[in-house]
Amino acid sequence: DEAVTESACRFLKEWNEQSSDKPLALVVGYVLPHCPYICPPELFRHYYARVSVPQLPPGCLDRMHPAEREDRQRRGFDALSDEQVRTARAAYYGLVEYHDRLCGRVLDALARTRFADNTVVVYTSDHGDMAGEHRLWTKSLFYEGSAGVPMIWSWPGRFAAGRVVGRVTSLLDIGPTLLDLADAK
């Protein structure tokens, strides 16, 4: 992800130095935050004392559908100690902050260009992560932590800052929406 960030920043600088007025589309794809949960040590230490360790309600496992119980057992979720859960969550939160810093570097590089005020920026993800909520660690579940993803749009002077749109959307909407905004076929 460091190399992706450096490449994106270099591309923006080089594009800014060209005399072309052609529009551009730049996709910056990151892996973070993702397994394995290994973050910079200072971020791990910062979050270790601050993260909670989710607990299942008493009798919860007994009330689960047998298929769900078997999946949890097969994946080893319920064998994790509170210490293992705390460690993983601290590292995950550290990775989220680290990823935020990388995105910030790309946005800073964009801000130093001549087209910063006329660029649509979209931040999103392909899936969420349970990150220990409900003592689960996967992405393929119907809990909000897994199914919900961020979708943040910015276009200076065109989109109102802080506006929240509560309608259901899909990642499939991004391409056509960008084409519409660019008045492109």
Image (cartoon, rainbow, N blue to C red):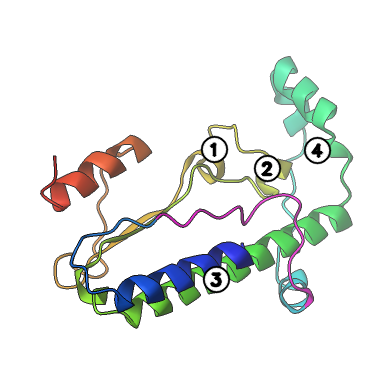
Q: Which residue does the image show at 56% across and 62% down from the upper left?
A: 4
Q: Give whichever of discs 4 and 1 has the lower sequence position.
A: 4
Q: Which residue is mark 4?
A: 77
Disc 4 crowd rating (10 Å Cα; few below 14, some 14-19, many 20+) is some
Q: Inspect the magenta stretch and tell me whether residue 39 lies in it.
A: yes
Q: Give whichever of discs 4 and 3 has the lower sequence position.
A: 3
Q: Which residue is mark 3?
A: 6
Q: Residue furthest left?
A: 183
The image shows residue 57 at horizontal and vertical percentages of 72, 41
Q: In the image, what residue type sits under mark 2? A: His
Report which quarter residue 92 is drawn in: bottom right
Q: Residue furthest front?
A: 19
Asked if marks 2 and 3 touch (Cβ < 8 Å), the reply is no
Q: Quadrant of the C terminus?
A: top left
Q: In the image, what residue type sits under mark 4? A: Phe
* Front residue (pair 120, 70): 120
Q: Which residue is mark 2?
A: 134
Marks 2 and 4: which is nearer the front? Answer: 4
SS under mark 1: loop
Q: In the image, what residue type sits under mark 1? A: Tyr
